[in-house]
Amino acid sequence: MAATGPDPWTQLVVNVGLTAVAHPMGYVKTLVQIGFEPLPPKLGRNLFFRQCWQLPGFFDYASHIRKVDGFFGLYRGFFPRVCGTIVGAAVSKTVGERMDEFFPVSDEKDREALKKKPKGTAKVSTQTFLAQTSKLTVSHCCAVIASHPFHVVAVRSMVQFVGRETKYSGWFSPYSEVYQQNGILGFFAGLIPRMLLDILSLWIGRTLYHLFNTLLLDDEMANVGELRSYAHAVTGFAGGMVTYPFGLVSNIMAVNDSGLVAGSAPFTPVYTSWLDCWRDLSRNNLLKRGNSLFFRRVPTKLGGIHNVALTPLD
């Protein structure tokens, strides 16, 4: 019997709920990514219990935002982010369904496997794997393009915290502000690295899972369903870790030359392209900035780190 997916409205409510729960963490990560550090480092211990200076983690950072702006201040940029989530999910689903209609799975065995197993975990032939991943690439690209204007507004709304601006606040005025500041291309600032992030993480994660599923797992093995679920999560996480710098560069470029303090000199250079931004971060060893929000050691190079008061370690 074919597996049926969740009701679309139920899935929408779940996605919005998860976005609401995760938004404060995404907000803090965005501020860290652009290099804003409003709190001084403090003495702590690393994973090997050695004493070192550490930058404040998520809870200290979020507490600072709450003290300045109140609890709801942790939800700057939430509305455009939700809009982007809804639009992206709708476009991805619609395009995905059309791709399945135009390019159905030809192998009957693989077709049955895809019906019975949770999405992305079925054991299929390499030919079907390549076809399915290619179709997902198209649907993901369409979703990223459609949702990116909301992403730009969300990021700019959040980084207003740095300069205490309000130009990207409100329900509709931020979109007019983006157009006045950067024209129509402003809605797609940082689009290319964000699209590369999505495509590469998709292919890396799915390829690793396909190899693991094909070479190491068998349907006769005990608890094979749980193993597949764990492997699917781990390989997806690995893909996201490898491609993290693309997301970092995308968020920086979404703010760059936006008329905000956080997107202008002297806070940050005004980059000519996302490749220029990548090269600058690479020179300063900052391509992983913000990938961790809990164990944040003070970097040896302080390029792009702002408002940090460093005290020599005794």
Image: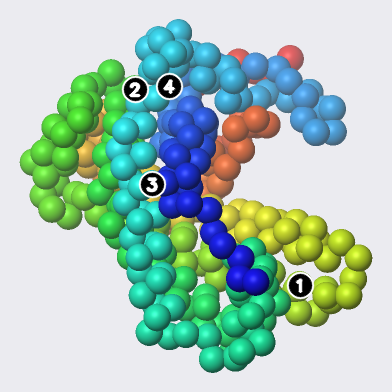
Q: SS for tag 1?
A: helix
Q: Which residue is mark 4?
A: 74
Q: SS for tag 4?
A: helix
Q: Callout 4: 10 Å neighbours few (<14), some, many (20+)?
A: many
User: Which label sits on residue 212?
Assistant: 1
- The reply to whether dot 4 and dot 2 touch (C-beta < 8 Å) is no
Three-letter amino acid code of the residue under disc 1: Phe
Q: Callout 1: 10 Å neighbours few (<14), some, many (20+)?
A: some
| Residue drawn at the location 88% of the way across and 75% of the way down | 220
Disc 4 to disc 2, C-alpha distance? 10 Å
| Residue drawn at the location 39% of the way across and 54% of the way down | 89
Disc 1 to disc 4, C-alpha distance? 40 Å
| Residue drawn at the location 35% of the way across and 56% of the way down | 90
Three-letter amino acid code of the residue under disc 4: Leu
Q: SS for tag 3?
A: helix
User: How many marks on residues?
Assistant: 4
Counting residues from the start of the chain, the first of labels 1 and 3 encountered is: 3
Q: Nearer the viewer, mark 2 or mark 1?
A: 1
Counting residues from the start of the chain, the first of labels 2 and 3 encountered is: 3
Q: Nearer the viewer, mark 4 or mark 3?
A: 3
User: Which label sits on residue 161?
Assistant: 2
Three-letter amino acid code of the residue under disc 3: Thr
Q: Residue furthest right?
A: 222
> How far across and how far down the image is residue 93, in percent?
40, 62
